[in-house]
Structures are given as C-alpha cells and as structure tokens.
Image (cartoon, rainbow, N blue to C red):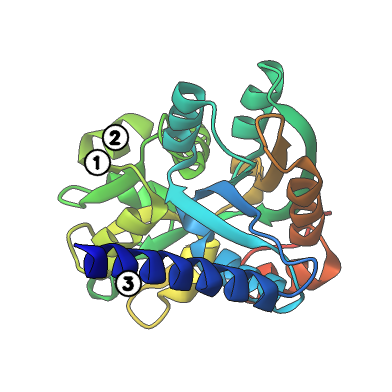
Amino acid sequence: MRFMRLTRVRLSTGFLMLLLCLGSAMPLGATTKELYMHCGAGLRQPVEELLRAYREKGGVNVTVEYAGSGQSLVRFKATKEGDLFLSGSAFFVEQLAKDGFVTHSFSIVLHPPVLAVHPSKTGEITTVDDLAKPGVRVGLGDPKAMALGRTAEEILSHSDKKDAILANTVVRAATVKQLSLYVTKGDVDAAILARSDAVQAKDALVFFDIDPAWYTPEIVTVAALNTSHHPEEALELAEFLRSPEAVVVFLSHGFSPLP
C-alpha cells in the first residue's frame, strides 16, 4: 500500500512538472484565440486560399462554416454565435444589420451570374430565353437559401418566357456548389450560375454572359458581428478580406471588381 501511495505521488509530481515545462515552452504572447465565420458556400475556394495566407501572416485561426447565405442567416439567428458573416450578397448582411448584429461591414467584389450549360446542349441553349424550349431541364437557386437564387428571380422577371422557364425548372438548389454539380453531371441542361463557379468548372460546362440590364449584381460583403468574443481580431480579419491583396484573389476565382 505504501509503495502504491508513493507511486501515485511520484506520478502526480511528474505530471505537474511536465505541465510546467510545457507552459514555459510556450512563446510569449502566444494566443489561443480563434474566430468563427459563417460563409457562403460559393465563396469557399477564394476564402480558403485567403485564410491560409492570413495564418501565414500571423493571423488567428479561423473556423469556417460554409452554407447558403440564407441557411447561414437562419443558423446564426438561432444560435447568436459567430465572429464574422461573409456572404455572396449584401442583402443578407443588411438583414443582420437591421437586427443590430453588425458592428462593421465592407463590400469586397461583385458576384455576377452567367448562364451555365452542359456541353451536350451548347448549340441549343445560349440565352436565358432558350431555357423555355420544350424538354430543357433547368436548375435554379432557392431564393430563400442563397444569393444566386434571388438574382435568378430578378433575371426571369425580365423575360417574357418566365412562366415557361419555371415550368422547365426541375430543381431548386440550396447552394451554388450543388447547382454547379447538377450542370456538370448532366442532371440539368442549364442553370443560372455564379460566374465564379462557372469559371472553376469551365472544363465541364460552357457559360454565356447574361444581359447586365436584367439583374443587379450581388456584392460579396463581410460583416464583423457584435456577438464576437474577439471583436478586435474579427475586425482585423474583415479588413483583410476587403484588402487589395484579397480582392486580387477573388478576381482570380472569377469574381468581378467593384465599380
């Protein structure tokens, strides 16, 4: 029994010394701060590239939850948790601002739409009105779930073939990534897709510009939230995401510059 007590004492003492050694080995000023960001699914590729660069510059770690902006909005309002909200549309940030959750917000780049077409239908579909042709399978975004769905609704409002296009619509996607996959896999013949996603999938689809008079381009917008536990770091990251360095990365992924 005495041997067992001595063993426990030695183990406890050794464990305490190990913790002290580890603590002394940590560099001065080391931080365990981490930010949590809600982010539109269509922004994933440039955001991941930017966050890698941000960490290399000495920025804090960031956990990102990707989803349709509408889905992210619902989730945030349910949990009231998060440091930043990055959306493919200013609309969703404006909703947060109206409810008093935003401390700072910044416009970054434009998020324009294109008409994305499966290669097998290239000669048949080149304009939005062609989506009304008999037998064409159309994919659109859900306007309640993501920014691109709202843009598609506006585009269709300018076509006198809107009803026929809606009748040909076989799927409403919750995220732009889902919509892109529907086109590239041939589950739909065409979709109104974000230009950035069409550029990323250019080897598996073709895309055509849409008359700019038919839509108001969405603006990628970042907001620092008043629910943040690290407001200074949240604002610093928001500033980084709208910096000239970050804009160049967004443009390389198919986004367009602000006017």
How far is mark 2 from mark 1, CA to CA? 5 Å
Q: Is residue 124 visible?
A: no
Q: Are marks 2 and 1 in contact (CB under 8 Å)?
A: yes
Q: Residue at x 69, y 46 (%)?
A: 222
Q: Residue at x 79, y 47 (%)?
A: 235
Q: Pointer 2: residues within 10 angstroms few (<14), some, or many (20+)? A: some
- Residue found at the far bottom of this picture: 203
Depicted 93 relative to depicted 200: above or below: above
In which quadrant is the C terminus drawn?
bottom right
Residue 49, horizontal then vertical, whole percent: 59, 74
Depicted 3 relative to depicted 172: above or below: below
Earlier sequence position, callout 3 versus callout 2: 3
Q: Which residue is mark 1?
A: 169
Q: Pointer 1: residues within 10 angstroms few (<14), some, or many (20+)? A: some
Side of 247 relative to 156 (left or right): right
Looking at the image, which is closer to me, 128 or 235? 235
Q: Residue at x 50, y 30 (%)?
A: 76
Residue 122 image label: 3
Q: Which residue is mark 2?
A: 166
In which quadrant is the N terminus drawn?
bottom left
Looking at the image, which is closer to me, 41 or 121? 41
User: Residue 20 lies in what quarter of the image?
Assistant: bottom right
Amino acid carrying label 2: it is Leu
Q: Nearer the viewer, mark 1 or mark 3?
A: 1
Looking at the image, which is closer to me, 253 or 122? 253
Q: Residue at x 70, y 70 (%)?
A: 54
> Disc 1 on helix, strand or loop?
strand
How far is mark 3 from mark 2, CA to CA? 20 Å
